[in-house]
Image (cartoon, rainbow, N blue to C red):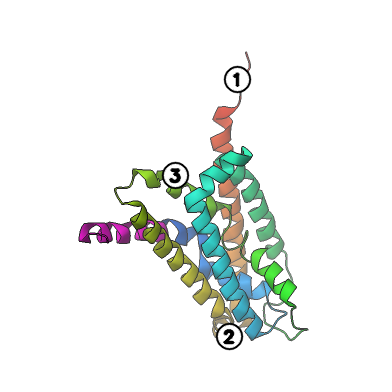
C-alpha cells in the first residue's frame, strides 16, 4: 500500500504527465482532422475508430514512458534523429491535409471492413496525427527522468497509468464528439477549424524537426 504522501506524489506525477502531453497530443485540435479522414464512414464506425485510436495512443505513450529509451538504444536511434524523422512525417501529413479540397461534412459510403478500421486506426489516425513524434519524445524524456522520482516502482506505474489514461480519455471524448462539434460549427466553421488545426500541426512538425536538428548539430564532427 502507498502512504498518503506517496498518493499525493502519484497525483502530482500523473498531473505532470498530462500537462506535458496534452498540448502536444491536442485532441481538441485533432477532432476536425479525425472527422475529415473518417468522413466516408458511418457514425458507428467513427465511434469504433475513436476507441481504437484512444487505446493505441494509450499503449504507445505507456510503452514510450517505460521502455522508450531502451527501444531507441537497441536500434541505435537517438531522440534527435527520431524527432527529425517524425517531424518530417508529421509535416507531410499536415501539408496534405492543408491541400485537401474535399468537404469535411460526413457523407454516406460503403462500410469499412475490419482490416480498414484496424489499419486506419493506427496509421494515420493514431500515428502520426494523434500520438506523434512530439508526444513520443516527451514521453521518452519523462520516462528517462522517472528513476529520479521518490516514488516506489508501484507508484510510478500507477502515476503513468493515470496520466496516459487521462490523455487517452480526452482523445476518445474529443473524437467521439467530433461529428456533433461539426454540426455545431457548420460546414464553413468546421473547414476553418480544420485549416487552423492542420496549420498548427504543420508548425508543430517543423518545430519537432528543428528540435532534432539542434540536438544533432553539436554532435557533428568538427573539421580539423
Q: Is residue 179 above or below residue 101?
A: below
Q: Residue at x 60, y 80 (%)?
A: 47
> Residue 57: in sight, yes or no?
yes
Magenta span main SS = helix
Please tell me whether mark 2 sits on a helix, a strand or a loop.
Answer: helix
- Give the label, 1 or 2, closer to the camera: 1
Residue 213 image point, x, y percent: 59, 38
As drawn, the residue found furthest toward the front would be 1
Instruction: Give the spatial CA distance, label 3 vs label 1.
Output: 29 Å
Mark 1 crowd level (few <14, some 14–19, many ≥20, 10 Å Cα): few
**Label 1, on which residue?**
222
Q: Nearer the viewer, mark 3 or mark 1?
A: 3
The local secondary structure at tag 3 comes to helix
Q: Are marks 1 and 2 in contact (CB under 8 Å)?
A: no
> Mark 3 or mark 2: which is in front?
3
Q: Could you tell me which quadrant the N terminus lies in?
A: bottom left
What residue sits right under mark 2 in the picture?
183
Which is nearer the eye, 16 or 23? 16
Residue at the farthest right position: 110
Q: Which residue is mark 3?
A: 144
Residue 210 appears anywhere in the view: no
In this view, 146 is above or below 104: above
Vertical relation: 206 (above or below) 56: above
- Range of residues picked out in magenta: 1-18
Measured as percent of width and height from the top left, residue 106 is found at 68, 82
Label 1 sits on a secondary structure element that is loop
Residue under the point 43% across and 67% down: 166
Q: Residues within 10 Å of mark 2 (few under 14, many from 20)?
A: few
Query: What x and y, as percent, mark residue 34?
Result: 62, 72
Spatial separation of the CA atoms under disc 3 and disc 2: 43 Å
Q: Are marks 3 and 1 in contact (CB under 8 Å)?
A: no
Amino acid at each position: 500500500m502507498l502512504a498518503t504522501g506517496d498518493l499525493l506524489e502519484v497525483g502530482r506525477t500523473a498531473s505532470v504527465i498530462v500537462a506535458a502531453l496534452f498540448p502536444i497530443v491536442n485532441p481538441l485540435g485533432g477532432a476536425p482532422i479525425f472527422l475529415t479522414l473518417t468522413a466516408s464512414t458511418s457514425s458507428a464506425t467513427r465511434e469504433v475508430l475513436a476507441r481504437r485510436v484512444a487505446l493505441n495512443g494509450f499503449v504507445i505513450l505507456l510503452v514510450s514512458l517505460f521502455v522508450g529509451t531502451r527501444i531507441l538504444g537497441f536500434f541505435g536511434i537517438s531522440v534527435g534523429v527520431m524527432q527529425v524523422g517524425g517531424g518530417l512525417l508529421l509535416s507531410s501529413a499536415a501539408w496534405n491535409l492543408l491541400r485537401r479540397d474535399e468537404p469535411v461534412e460526413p457523407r454516406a459510403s460503403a462500410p469499412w471492413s475490419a482490416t480498414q478500421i484496424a489499419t486506419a486506426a493506427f496509421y494515420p489516425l493514431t500515428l502520426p496525427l494523434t500520438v506523434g513524434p512530439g508526444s513520443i519524445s516527451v514521453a521518452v524524456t519523462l520516462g528517462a527522468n522517472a528513476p529520479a522520482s521518490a516514488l516506489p516502482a508501484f507508484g510510478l506505474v500507477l502515476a503513468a497509468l493515470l496520466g496516459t489514461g487521462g490523455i487517452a480519455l480526452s482523445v476518445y471524448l474529443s473524437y467521439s464528439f467530433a461529428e456533433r462539434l461539426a454540426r455545431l460549427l457548420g460546414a464553413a466553421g468546421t473547414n476553418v477549424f480544420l485549416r487552423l488545426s492542420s496549420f498548427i500541426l504543420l508548425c508543430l512538425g517543423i518545430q519537432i524537426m528543428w528540435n532534432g536538428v539542434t540536438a544533432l548539430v553539436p554532435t557533428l564532427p568538427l573539421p580539423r
